[in-house]
Amino acid sequence: MDTRLEAVRSIVLDRNPGEGEFHQAVDEVFASLVAVLDKHPEFAEASILERICEPERQIIFRVPWVDDTGKVQINRGFRVEFNSALGPFKGGLRFHPSVYQGIIKFLGFEQIFKNALTGMPIGGGKGGADFDPRGRSEGEIMRFCQSFMTELYRHLGEYTDVPAGDIGVGGREIGFLFGQYKRITNRYESGVLTGKGTSWGGSLVRPEATGYGTVLFTQEMLRTRKQTFDGQRVAVSGSGNVALHAIVKAQELGAKVVTASDSSGFVVDEAGIDVDLLSQIKEVERGRIGEYAERRQETAKFVDGGSVWDVDATVALPCATQNELLEEDAVKLVKSGVTAVAEGANMPCTSKAADVFHDAGVLFGPGKAANAGGVATSALEMQQNASRDSWTFEYTEERLTDIMVGIHDRCATTADEYGQPGNYVAGANISGFVRVADAMLAQGVI
Ligand code: GLU
């Protein structure tokens, strides 16, 4: 590694021990930056790299709540306000038992560059808690969200920090969080959270945006090789908000999506995933994916454990969680003839898996670019809130499409400019980084 990068990398490792996912996210960005430092010596002179790796503010707090049996439960809450050079801190909240500082920092770090890449005025942040929503009643979820917000509210604001959802945080949780924020502050401050319900300040298309955006980005990548989604055999992992909407959009464009998964295993449906059934089971009944196969016995089978990437596909869209697609999975997918992979989740492919795709000439859209449609539509929600307006579905989807095409073009042009044509990872990292670094330089040492 370049000595300028290596020096900062060792500071980051020393300062953040035990935070493997954060180190991985930093390494992935740094791997693209040598040419940037050569072209912009002013970035190293102003210690931009070291500054960008150190969050502006990190908040860790106790979240006490009472469960349905009357027992007091304690969770740990986080908000990492990573970078506000381009706008208020912006990024989701994740409620999942795996959450700790290293996960929130990796997500916050990615969010800085992803948000920059959208071209919109939003900084980067992320938060969450090690709370496991699975099996919890509605009342328990509400009390948890209220307790979480009772501490976090003092750090938020439409001009300061604007959370949204992520794994374990959907429309229901945003509702409870918003209600508590409103109650504590005595302000109907719509722009303080995004992902709200459409009757109380939410934006149409926000629920669909991440999954739709991933497919739209993939469509743009395919277009560069004169291909389309029509007739593609698509493997999707996950069955949450991102996966469901990626499946809908890919099928709308003529693809057959044959898989979906959750932590219990995956389903293969050779007739194409029935998204209404899947969403009924996952979103309404909050059940496990095996039930899908039980109700579609003619065409679908459930595989207990194993890897969804064992299934042959021409397009793969990992939409579950970080590090879910390993080097050996990438090798299998390449053998099965995959031509395009796009990350609907954040960092679902390990660095080695991404290298396999790169070396095999597979189109590879990193999450910073391919899943940016969600946060970009959050920024559209903020625009609507600021103007006390609400846009139609068609207009909002048009804006999302323009944004995804813009992100694709920005990545492609930047990759060309830096001598790495077709490398969307380099394009996304460099383009996002330069936008943030320029703004940090202009704003002085803060
Ligand atoms: N959690 C989403 C992401 O990873 C969305 C964040 C937002 O809308 O603020 O980008």
Image: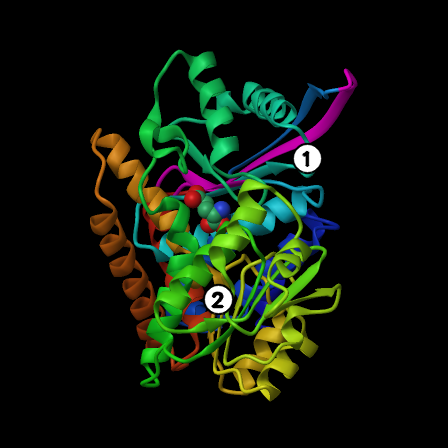
The quadrant the C terminus occupies is top left
Counting every numbered tag in the picture gives 2
Q: Nearer the viewer, residue 358 or 73?
A: 73
Corner quadrant of residue 261? bottom right
- Looking at the image, which residue is at 60% across and 67% down? 349
Q: Is residue 331 magenta?
A: no
Q: Quadrant of the N terminus?
A: bottom right
Query: Dot 1: what SS?
Result: loop
Mark 2 neighbour class, 10 Å CA radius: few under 14, some 14 to 19, many 20 or more:
many
Q: Which label's residue is closer to the chain start, 2 or 1? A: 1
The magenta stretch is: 69-93
Residue at 51% x, 48% y is: 51
Q: Is residue 75 magenta?
A: yes
Magenta region, main secondary structure: strand
Question: Looking at the picture, how far across and down is residue 29, in whole percent?
Answer: 52, 63
Image check: 331 left or right of 92? Answer: right
Tag 2: residue type?
A: Pro
- In this picture, residue 427 sits left or right of residue 238: left
Q: Is residue 206 visible?
A: yes
Name the mark on residue 131. Answer: 1
In percent of width and height, residue 270 lies at 56, 74
Quarter-wise, where is residue 294 in the image? bottom right
The mark closer to the camera, 2 or 1, is 1
Q: Which mark is residue 366?
A: 2
Residue 197, disc: none
